[in-house]
């Protein structure tokens, strides 16, 4: 065979990634479980391109040059294992399988070990940027063996989004490192989405603003170094869009119940298991889960009272971007990235991933959903100190947090009095206040544990483990 690149799975992401590869000079062969889809693609978006279709996996494999580079874009979970099971008997030594879906990183660890033991290469690659990113240049997070990565490097460096200091792809690390980094990327994505949703709720319910007025504030935010980002940009678009069926703002007719496909949950579960606090990301996940209890919420609305009106909260001047609200969002976004990076630090230590945090900041600057101007600062922070335990300890970010805290406090306090839930903003405030506290009340928790269970405690003034007979 002579085709440079093979794709299995013609969903939107698969289609766009193969068009991206072909545009970058890689002749391709595509396979889909139902051939009708392949045919439709080749007659439609794939027409006139250096792309051929295969009816069977045997034909697919025979069409590829060796070592074969095969990207699987199938649903995470069992479909990935099924695809591996059906194609691996047809592969030869050195051939490479790449899983570009949002797989659970422990599944990827297992698959890398299995496939490598058969002398195949296996790459678990996070791909971010949605459909448009896949076509025009995504951010890519490949993990597996270094040798396997070397065999796909020329391909992925061309396909990835390009920023001033290079393509948005790098070798992430061994085993499931690529998918773990993508998972945490998505956790941060959940955080920022929820922060912007809370800002919207306050603008609407406290500020009485309509979609266009809110969109203007977002447009202002998007001009700042701290908030300029893809998610702020699309939030402006979402808020400005009118309902084709009515004329009002489209967002107002969308059901307020958010689903999820797993990555946000896995971020939080991993964080709990690894002992890393990620309360802002957890709050975002929980907000989605709670939102989906819509019938219960509607019932509760009639039973549990809202606070009395009055004590108006001041969001500030819209023309200046509602300064306290902007401060609150900046602090919470920084903290979302910070919690994600802290989780990556711990995962890297536990799994020997040897992650390069500055490089992760670099590949997130373009292509991906959480791309933001702030990532340059994140890259700088980890270049200056690769072992930085928390972004807030970097001088530039510490100054930002100090500058934004008064606004965050005002917003969280005001929202509490108004009865408007701001789970991400309030968790962020608690997180910062806890993190900056040299003394926390867990001395009392330790006392209680020793009191009822003789769990012992340590003293500030002398070494050793102590026990007291608290109850005589
Ligand atoms: C991306 C996205 C994408 C993912 C959803 C998140 O980086 O391009 O993270 O990979 O499919 O956007 O999924 P849910 O919000 O549905 O969990």
Image: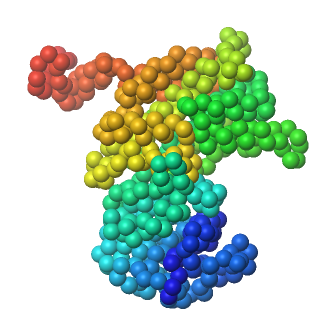
In depth, the one of 30 and 306 nearer the eye is: 30
Where's residue 110, x and y in %? 35, 66
User: On the image, which quarter does residue 325 sit in?
Assistant: top right
Where's residue 191, x and y in %? 53, 39
In depth, the one of 4 and 333 nearer the eye is: 4
Residue depicted at x 36% and y 33%: 390
Side (left or right) of 363 relative to 349: right
Residue depicted at x 88% and y 47%: 245
Residue depicted at x 45% and y 67%: 154
Residue 302 showing in the rendered view = no
Q: Is residue 451 above or below residue 37?
A: above
Residue depicted at x 38% and y 58%: 171
Residue 397 showing in the rendered view = yes
Where's residue 242, x and y in %? 83, 42
Where's residue 314, x and y in %? 67, 14
In depth, the one of 325 and 145 nearer the eye is: 145
Q: Is residue 183 above or below residue 121?
A: above
- Colour scheme of the rendered structure: rainbow
Side (left or right) of 25 relative to 208: left
- Residue at the extreme top: 311
Q: The C terminus is located in which quarter? A: top left
User: On the image, which quarter does residue 178 sit in?
Assistant: bottom left
Q: Is residue 1 above or below residue 231?
A: below
Q: Number of labelled discs? A: 0
- Residue at the extreme front: 164
Side (left or right) of 450 relative to 365: left
């Amino acid at each position: 065979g002579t085709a440079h690149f093979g794709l299995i799975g013609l969903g939107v992401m698969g289609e766009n990634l193969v068009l991206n590869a072909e545009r970058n000079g890689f002749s391709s062969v595509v396979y889909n479980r139902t051939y009708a889809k392949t045919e439709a693609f080749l007659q439609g978006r794939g027409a006139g391109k250096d792309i051929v279709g295969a009816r069977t996996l045997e034909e697919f494999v025979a069409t590829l040059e060796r070592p074969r580079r095969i990207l699987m874009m199938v649903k995470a979970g069992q479909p990935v294992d099924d695809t591996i099971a059906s194609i691996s008997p047809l592969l030869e030594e050195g051939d490479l399988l790449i899983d570009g879906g949002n797989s659970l990183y422990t599944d990827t660890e297992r698959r890398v070990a299995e496939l490598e033991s058969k002398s195949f290469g296996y790459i678990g690659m996070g791909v971010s940027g949605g459909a448009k990113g896949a076509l025009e240049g995504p951010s890519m997070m490949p993990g597996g063996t270094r040798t396997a990565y070397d065999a796909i490097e020329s391909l992925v460096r061309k396909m990835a989004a390009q920023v001033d200091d290079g393509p948005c792809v790098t070798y992430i690390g061994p085993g499931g490192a690529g998918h773990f980094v993508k998972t945490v990327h998505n956790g941060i994505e959940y955080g920022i989405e929820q922060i912007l949703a809370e800002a919207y709720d306050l603008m609407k319910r406290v500020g009485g603003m309509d979609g266009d007025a809110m969109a203007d504030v977002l447009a202002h935010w998007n001009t700042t170094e701290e908030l300029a980002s893809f998610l702020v940009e699309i939030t402006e678009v979402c808020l400005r869009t009118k309902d084709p069926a009515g004329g009002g703002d489209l967002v107002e007719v969308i059901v307020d119940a958010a689903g999820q496909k797993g990555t946000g949950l896995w971020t939080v579960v991993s964080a709990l298991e690894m002992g890393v606090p990620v309360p802002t990301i957890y709050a975002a996940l929980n907000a989605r889960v709670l939102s989906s209890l819509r019938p219960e919420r509607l019932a509760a609305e009639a039973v549990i009272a809202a606070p009395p009106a009055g004590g108006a909260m001041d969001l500030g001047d819209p023309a200046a971007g509602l300064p306290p609200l902007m401060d609150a969002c900046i602090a919470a976004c920084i903290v979302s990235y910070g919690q994600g990076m802290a989780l990556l630090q711990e995962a890297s230590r536990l799994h020997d991933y040897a992650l390069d945090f500055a490089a992760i900041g670099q590949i997130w600057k373009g292509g991906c959903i959480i791309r933001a101007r702030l990532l340059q600062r994140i890259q700088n922070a980890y270049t200056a100190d690769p072992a930085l335990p928390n972004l807030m300890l970097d001088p530039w970010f510490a100054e930002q947090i100090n500058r934004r805290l008064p606004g965050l406090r005002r917003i969280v306090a005001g929202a509490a009095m108004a009865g408007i839930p701001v789970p991400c903003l309030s968790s962020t405030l608690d997180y910062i206040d806890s993190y900056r506290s040299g003394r926390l009340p867990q001395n009392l928790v330790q006392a209680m544990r020793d009191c009822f269970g003789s769990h012992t405690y340590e003293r500030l003034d002398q070494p050793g483990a102590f026990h007291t007979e608290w109850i005589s």
